[in-house]
Amino acid sequence: MGEKLNRWLEKPVFIYGFGLFFLVFKTAQFFPYFEWKLFLSFLCLYTAITFTVLLIAQKLGSGKYMAGWLLIIWIALLFTSNITRVFIQDFKIFFNITYLLVTVIIVCIFFYLIKKRLNKIFIQRANKLLNIFLFFLMLINLIAGILNANKEKIHAANKSGRCIPIIQHKNDIIWILLDEYGAPESLNDQFQFHDKLVDSLRNKSFYVFDSLAYRTDATIYTLNSLFNLDDSIPITNYQYAAYYLKKSKWVEELEKQGYSFIDLDFLNIGGKEKFININIFPDNYTEKIFNNTFFAILLNNLKGIDDKMRIDDYNGKVIQALTKTVQQKVSYPRFIWSHLMIPHLPFYRNENGSLNPKPLYDPVLYSKAELSKQYLDYVSYANSVVLKILNEIPDRQQKTIIITGDHGARMLVSKNDKQRFETFAAIYYPRMDTTELINIRYLQQIPLHLH
């Protein structure tokens, strides 16, 4: 038995095992989407393609090293976005001396081995090492996924007991979320910027907070804590947070009180269809498998989706839809939620709203001065957008209107800096009690005070 296993491990089984590892890796990140029929179908497809390529290479007399080359190709195809993120978006990694030395050493060893023409014994040992490594990598991912799934059961148990006060005066609730909009205090400290939106909103009888906090600086986590009325329990990854948004406790509670929820967001909130799908968080098992792969990127290109401008297009459509929705007259109360990716990177617009010819995509690659200028221009553009929408809301004084960010401006501060977690917030509603609002410290507490 031991001899048979050893001979089996000396073969390039890893090239087939990699397909199984990829599927386990994707599945273990988020088990609720798992479909065993699709799992087996994807595995069979991968195996058939791999077998065909190896067979053709063998027929052409070039099959000796093909398993190794094919593994590299599969990694490039299935982890495209991950590789891009490391080598392009996180370009600063190239300035790390340790990384450079390790890369140079690996490349030198690789070309040395190719030059020496690897012998049969070395190839067998390499196959064995890769097979065992892949097996343990798969096992580690599977165990980690099971442990995370067990942790997430706590959220389901805790969510059931959460509720909001009965809303006595059921007027429309309009929430405008401005992604990456820092608190007024933070903008002043970081950029010496006086936020004119604060003055404008106070003139319109809004209560503007100097600062409100979140316990996280990631959008998907902050929105999950808001829509599920709690953020006291950490969530293991983005996919679980996106999944909980679909089952929003706040939306459920509002609908029980007669509200109609309108979701103008690229996220699926409260089980409503995404306003626009910009392919950030997958909605099913197939999307989960193909997400961040070369094939997903190719499909977007075939659909004519401009990856660089898709967020600006999204912002424009949200603004248009929000303006139209708030002007509609209906006989029932609505909760109109809108999420603008402004003033979040990339900084697509100048202060006057014209297209920025050179928007910044990665803060690491630019000077503090250039980064600050483009960010503040985008903040000013956000201000003009908000004020224009407010001026077009009929009977605005009879609505509940909330304007917030989701976290602070993160580009120029360290990961633990408190300004990353401090965001903009302003509220207006009829018969507003400012003595009550003063007690709000965290953004996710706002739903508990809308009564």
Image (cartoon, rainbow, N blue to C red):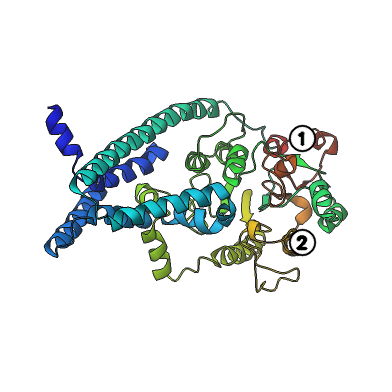
In depth, the one of 209 and 233 nearer the eye is: 233
Mark 1: secondary structure: loop
Q: Position of residue 282 (x, y in %)?
A: 43, 50
Residue 333 in the figure: left or right of residue 79:
right
The vertical placement of 393 against 356, above or below, is: above
Q: Which mark identifies residue 369?
A: 2
Quadrant holding the N terminus: top left
Q: Dots 2 and 1: beta carbons under 8 Å?
A: no
Q: Which residue is at the front of the view, 135 or 96?
A: 96
Towards the viewer: 204 or 181: 181
Q: Secondary structure at mark 2?
A: helix
- Can residue 385 be seen in the rendering of this structure? no
Residue at image location 45% in from the left, 31% down from the top: 148
Q: In the rendering, at what x and y percent does residue 221 appear?
A: 58, 41
Q: Amino acid at mark 2?
A: Ala
Identify which residue is drawn at 62% across, 48% down: 335
Badge 2 density bin: few <14, some 14–19, many ≥20, Cα 10 Å? few
Mark linked to residue 440:
1
Q: Residue at x 67, y 71 (%)?
A: 356
Observer-side mark, 2 or 1, equals 2
Image quarter where the C terminus lies is top right
Q: Amino acid at mark 1?
A: Ile
Q: Residue at x 23, y 55 (%)?
A: 65
With 353 as the anchor, is 31 left or right in this view? Answer: left
Indicate the position of residue 105 as horizontal and vertical percent values.
44, 50
